[in-house]
Amino acid sequence: SKAEIAEAEKQAKLLTWAYETAVAKGMPQAAMMKGKADQAVAALEALKAQAEGKPAPPAVPAAPVSSPVVAAPVAAAPAVAAVAPSGASKAEIAEAEKQAKLLTWAYETAVAKGMPQAAMMKSKADQAVAALQAL
């Protein structure tokens, strides 16, 4: 019904906002919120498809919701920095940068393909970026 769709849309928007806010603040709950937001969007899409008489879309996370925040892991790295020596060498910094870029790419690819590992990769990418910034 229209009321169910409106409620699902409201829930999806709320959870997406919560996820984006968690990412922006570097909160460790961001990965969990991403999963919840993706589930809410998938439920909304299923309700919309059902209302239109179409078969429900597969239960994969919807990429459009993720797209606006794909660059967020690098831009809004967590404030929780890993403990690292303050005098890191150039080689250590280069290696940390390489690792952060690789894990961020893996996360973005997982989101784009709607893979269930996206939340885990986000967490790993955020940790790598935090470690880099700690150096």
Image (cartoon, rainbow, N blue to C red):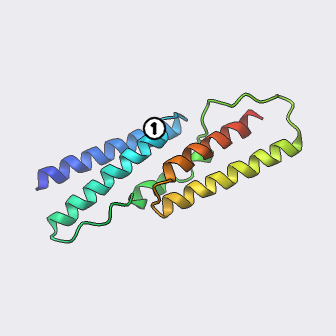
Q: Residue at x 29, y 66 (%)?
A: 57
Above or below — where is 67 with respect to 133? below
The residue where tag 1 is placed is: 21
Q: In the rendered image, is residue 72 in sight?
A: no
Work out whether residue 71 or residue 124 is closer to the camera in this orientation and state it.
124
Task: Give left or right: position of 55 versus 78.
Answer: left
Name the spot of residue 108 as percent of width and height, x first. Answer: 56, 57
Task: Give left or right: position of 64 versus 75.
Answer: left
Q: Residue at x 16, y 68 (%)?
A: 52
Q: Secondary structure at mark 1?
A: helix
**What is the residue that sits farthest to the bottom in this orientation?**
54
Above or below — where is 27 with respect to 103? above
**Quadrant hosting residue 109:** bottom right
Work out whether residue 18 or residue 32 is closer to the camera in this orientation and state it.
32
> Where, quadrant-wise, is the N terminus in this rendering?
bottom left
Name the spot of residue 128 as percent of width and height, x first. Answer: 67, 43
Name the spot of residue 133 as percent of width and height, x first. Answer: 72, 37
Q: Residue at x 84, y 42 (%)?
A: 92
> Where, quadrant-wise, is the C terminus in this rendering?
top right
Q: Residue at x 21, y 62 (%)?
A: 48
Give the total of numbered labels.
Answer: 1
Instruction: Check disc 1 and give the amino acid type.
Output: Thr
**Quadrant hosting residue 93:** top right
Name the spot of residue 55 as percent of width and height, x first. Answer: 22, 70
